[in-house]
Amino acid sequence: MKIFSKFYAEITALVVFIIYTFTLAPTIIHLDAGELTAVQATLGIAHPTGYPLFTILGYFVSKLFLFVDTVLVLNLLVSIYCAGSVYILAKLTFLLLSNFSEKVKIGKKFQQHLIDIPIDSKGVIASVVGLMVGFSKTFWFQSTSVEVYSLHLLLISLILFFAVRAYYNIGKYDWYFVAIFLAFAFSNHMTTLLLLPGIALLFFNQNGLKKESFLKITKMIAIFVPLLVVIYSYLPIRALQEPILNWGNPIDFERIIRHITGKQYQVWIFSSTEAAKKQFEYFVNSLPIELGYIGLIISMIGIPILLKYTKILGIFFLINFFSTLFYSINYDIADIDAYFLLAFISLIIFSSALFIKFIQRLSKKFIYLFFAIPLVMVVINFNNVDQSNKYAFEDYTKSILENSTENSIVMSYLWDYFISPSYYYQFVENYRDDVVIVDKELLRRSWYFSQLSNLYPEVMANVSTQSISFLKALEPFEKDEAYDSRLLEERFRNLLTSFISNNIEERDFYITPELFLNEIKSGELTLPKGYELVPMEYTFKVAKVGADYIPINYKQSVIRFDNNLNHYEITIRNLIVNVMIYRLLYEIQFGMFENAKVIHNKIKHDFPEYNIPPAVLRELEKIR
């Protein structure tokens, strides 16, 4: 089809975007999606490294569609970012194909000649490679809900494209475009650093080590640095305006540097050889599914062929692959998949060389069979990435809020499941924004006290003495100075208890189940004297010892779980059931046997996979 000779990239991007809409999340899902959506909608400051470009772009786009749910607009925006990345990578592949060369014997000598590839064939291959990237599992997942990696994919694709163009001397200003997009990319995600070794290879291979080369680098830096500074200046400028969400409160040089370098996360980088081994094994085990098995085989076979066709560019993509792999396996976090994205992209690009070899050896008429490869990837990865029926995080968050009394306090550290989503529903949709949510783990950071004081001055005023005492002990820790760990922990625990004791007379106080199951039992969180916990619908309420029976609504809110449960949804189900079990025992304690039976039946009906503890079953037998 001649159409691929002109519109191969547009067709490829359109196809992936259409399919992305079928797997798009309709609302907030897990991890950082709620926080990042809220930060964009309110022009706030996100967790390190701040992501100012991502925030600013999202804010302006969200204001263009005032009568559409903000979360849906911003979820669609990340799909556009990812489809745009596929478009650029298809263009990049076409560019590579146009410059593949091999040695041809002319007379008695071998000479390097460009491989004669029909333009429509190049379009088909570029489209296939673009589709393979677009439907690889982790890449595809970035298109389903708000995450910074979607914009990062678009920006690194632009950097790769212009770096290769510059290497081939196609455009006079391509190296300066590289500098511009490097500044944009660094303002979005610091893993842009992983591109620099490969870019240096291309630059010096083309320009050599001479005075003119370093003059050009100086000009690139003169573009890069001011642009980066201007974009990152958003952080202190906005922080001084005290936005609703102000992570890190980067109002001075020390806090700005701490924020944009992600200092609090550095403890997980190069932490141990055991962690690196674990992450490497995870990478190797995920590769077959990531590339749809056959895609992995074709990409691996394509490595030596691409090195033969274009040695320097082959080395360039190998450097990108190994620098990404080396860094990522040494970052000991659970959600590591997105950090491997540049490695996946680099690997897939090698497949283009094998496709050329097929054309050379076989007939051109078989070229359209290559589309079977991304089709296989769609079939394999669709269910793994499909977020179109993920409502559990919205429902769980709203259920906790709805079942909390007016102006009450909820303490939690369920960031992925509740706190992050609550930022969107409370601060963008204004859903039950009277409820005060306190993140127990973020209380370990001084900036969080400023955010809480701006949002809930009365609550923080009640713990001002304990806050000042804790922050004084925390200061040397945050400045990397000698600190008293025992004193710091002692004052932190006192602060947690004070949140309850100093506010309980004015506001009802709830804790989420993980605090009960972990911190209460370990003694990190201690209830004030004379108080105990009462299991409610989804949380535990702090009540006076010996208080009267506290009723609940046994219908509970309906949590819409997807048939294809992920790890995070399974965790929510376990948390809900744990509270229900304790509530069942509470009902028996007060002689509310019919209520206990209702809860038991609800557990069996709604959570059939859960095995009720034998001790609880024995208590139920007594009341039958």
Image (cartoon, grey):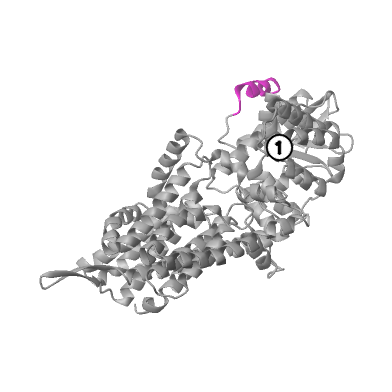
Quadrant occupied by the C terminus: top right
Residue at far left of view: 108
Residue that lies at the very extreme toward the front in this rendered image: 211
> What residue range appears in magenta?
612-624
Residue furthest toward the right? 505
Magenta stretch mostly in which secondary structure?
helix
Quadrant (top left/top right/bottom left/bottom right) for the N terminus: bottom left
Badge 1 crowding class, 10 Å Cα cut-off, few under 14, some 14 to 19, many 20 or more, is some
Rendered image quadrant of residue 549: top right
Q: Amino acid at mark 1?
A: Arg
Element class at badge 1: helix
Residue at 61%, 44% (x, y): give it: 263
Q: Position of residue 281 (x, y in %)?
A: 41, 40
Residue for point 44% across, 37% down: 278
534 left or right, relative to 322 = right
Q: In the image, is residue 254 above or below residue 16?
A: above
Residue 219 part of the magenta segment: no
Q: Position of residue 318 (x, y in %)?
A: 36, 54
x, y percentage for residue 530?
84, 23
Q: Is residue 620 magenta?
A: yes
Q: Residue at x 36, y 63 (%)?
A: 205
Q: Quadrant of residue 612?
A: top right
Q: Which residue lies under the disc numbered 1?
A: 444
Position in image of residue 113 (x %, y %) = 23, 72
Vertically, is 193 above or below 512?
Answer: below
User: Would residue 284 be visible to someone looking at this image?
Assistant: yes
